[in-house]
Amino acid sequence: MGAEPPGPRIRRAQGPVEQIPSRQKVSPHEQCQPEPAQGVWSVEVSVSKPSGSLKHFLHQCKGLTSDPWVLNAVQGYEIEFGIEPIQISVPKPIQFSVDEQVLVDNEVRDMILKGAVEPCTHEHGKFIYNIFLVQKKNGKFRPVINLRDLNDCIEYHHFKQETLEVILQSVQRNDFFTSVDLKDAYFSVPIAEHHRKFLRFQWRGILYEFCALPFGIYSLCTCGAAVAEWLRCPTL
């Protein structure tokens, strides 16, 4: 994606690669979280589980639906803006403890491995957010970026998730139903390249952008509603 971003260089290799932090000065506007005491962050850069995987199944999707919205989203989802997105200022970096920095390191590394995020360069019109962690029910953590400012610019479509009670009322004799929990389901939806600049965060002096749909964006509900409606198709 053009020139390499400032900060540690990432080189592809078979095993973990050490990144030696850059000594370049960072302006207060672009300052990110402090590095831990050891000053070295190792990251495996070989992408083993590419995100945005739906784009590889466009042909199969065309055999299931002719809905242009669904087919466009499969190739690269474009954020549905209601007003022009403008970020007035970059939020101040969140201060993490050493233990919390390790958790963020692990989650960022995991997203790199999945192909959900990748390093990028600064460009006009970008949005930069803070990354933080939200604990899930299973005790693990989900990386989240605060997209409140961006969500204010997105067209909101009301989405009501169907409850178990509603589903049970629709089950008739000899019917059955099952619940499927798709791992990293939102990461399977690719983001159109020209809209990735609106989904960026900084960590360890490196600017990253999401290549797949991140958790916390209003569009996630829109995608979920479209998929749910498609699954109700009587031919399936």
Image (tube, helix red, strand yellow):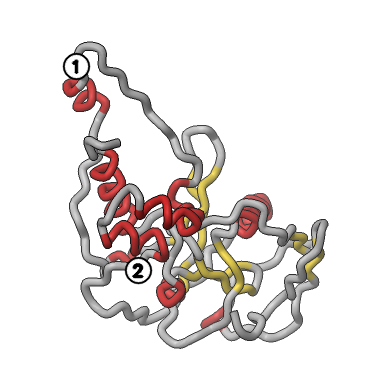
Front position among marks 2 and 1? 1
Nearest the eye: 210 or 26: 210
Query: What residue would you read off at disc 2?
Result: 78
User: Which quadrant: the N terminus?
Assistant: bottom right
Which residue is at a point 63% across and 83% down the rendered structure image?
A: 26
- 118 horizontally vs 42: left or right: left
Disc 1 is placed on an element classified as loop
Check disc 1 and give the amino acid type: Gln
Mark drawn on residue 4? none
Extreme-top residue of the structure: 173
Please indicate, yes or no, whether residue 164 appears anywhere in the rendered image: yes
Residue name at image x 67 percent, y 53 percent: 48
Q: Residue at x 29, y 51 (%)?
A: 65
Across and down, in percent, residue 170 comes to 18, 23
Q: Nearer the viewer, residue 25 or 144?
A: 144
Using residue 93 as the reference point, say whether residue 77 is left or right of it: left
C-alpha separation, residue under disc 2 versus residue under disc 1: 39 Å
Above or below, comparing residue 101 to residue 230 in the picture: below
Q: Residues within 10 Å of mark 2 (few under 14, many from 20)?
A: some
Say which element carries label 2: loop
Residue matched to label 1? 172
